[in-house]
Image (cartoon, rainbow, N blue to C red):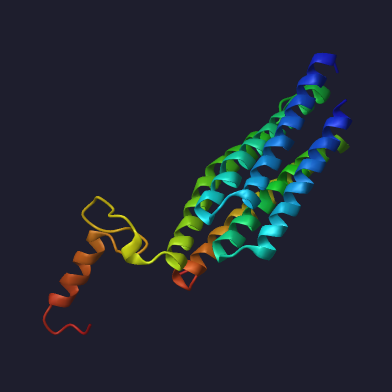
Amino acid sequence: MSGIVEILISVFIVLGGVFGLVGSFGLVKLGNTIQRLHGPTKATTLGIGCALIASMLYFFSSKGSVSFHELLITLFLFLTAPISANFIAKAYIVRNIERHELPASGGEYGWSVYDDPPALNQEKENEGARPGSIT
Amino acid sequence: MIAIALMIAYACFGLGLLFCLWRIAFGPTLSDRILALDTMVINLIALLVLYGIWKGTAVYFEASMLIAMVGFVSTVAYCRFVLRGDIIE
């Protein structure tokens, strides 16, 4: 393994560690839950991306073949991080923020946490209007 | 040189795990605890990948992939339970 590649791998490993530490430290330091959501979802994901790049370079230089496992893990993590962040924010809104405290959604119907989409509402109305239906 | 870098990164991610543990123990809201658990899973995957570099084998990629999937599904299941009181409706 040549010296330059080794230095590059070491830099990526240390960079990954620093980003991971920053993300986890943000979890402790920041003020409220919605702010805390930023640390792990951005910094830690970037840190693990750096670690996976380092791993890819290492196995490329030591074995001479590119492995796609790292790419798969990176892709999976980068796809799932925003989804889980969205779910955590929704759980926070449901448990900690009253409905009247939320700003207006700016659309025809309210936030999805509290209101059903209009198609579902219309379906319910149609069912209610049908004669002889049990609601 | 890679060994020293790996030691530094181990220390960083280990410290990150401790921060997550602190948030799980003292987190004021439930969402904080879910978030800390999610972060813990990500830190664990990083540790596994670094351990794979340390040992020079590609065995740990399957393990970290599995942990990533289980972590995501459990986060979503936990949030869904908080949101709707049920996981699969």
Query: On the image, which quarter does residue A112 sit in?
Result: bottom left
Query: On the image, which quarter does residue A17 sit in?
Result: top right
Q: Indicate whether A134 appears above or below A2.
A: below
- Toward the viewer: B2 or B71? B2
Q: Residue at x 78, y 28 (%)?
A: A59
Give residue B10's position: percent from left, percent from top.
Answer: 81, 41
Q: Residue at x 71, y 34 (%)?
A: A16
Q: Indicate whether A3 appears above or below B17.
A: above
- Toward the viewer: A18 or A46? A18
Q: Residue at x 76, y 21 (%)?
A: A8
- Left or right of residue A81, residue B19 in this image: right
Q: Residue at x 17, y 77 (%)?
A: A128
- Left or right of residue A1, residue B62 in this image: left
- Toward the viewer: B20 or B68? B20
Which quadrant holds the N terminus of chain B?
A: top right
The count of marks equals 0
Give residue B84's position: percent from left, percent from top.
Answer: 44, 70
Res. A79 visible in picture: yes
- Left or right of residue A90, residue A32 in this image: right
Which quadrant holds the C terminus of chain B?
A: bottom left
Give residue B74's position: percent from left, percent from top.
Answer: 60, 60
Give residue A71's position: percent from left, percent from top.
Answer: 63, 34
Res. B58 visible in picture: no
Q: Indicate whether A106 appears above or below A134.
A: above
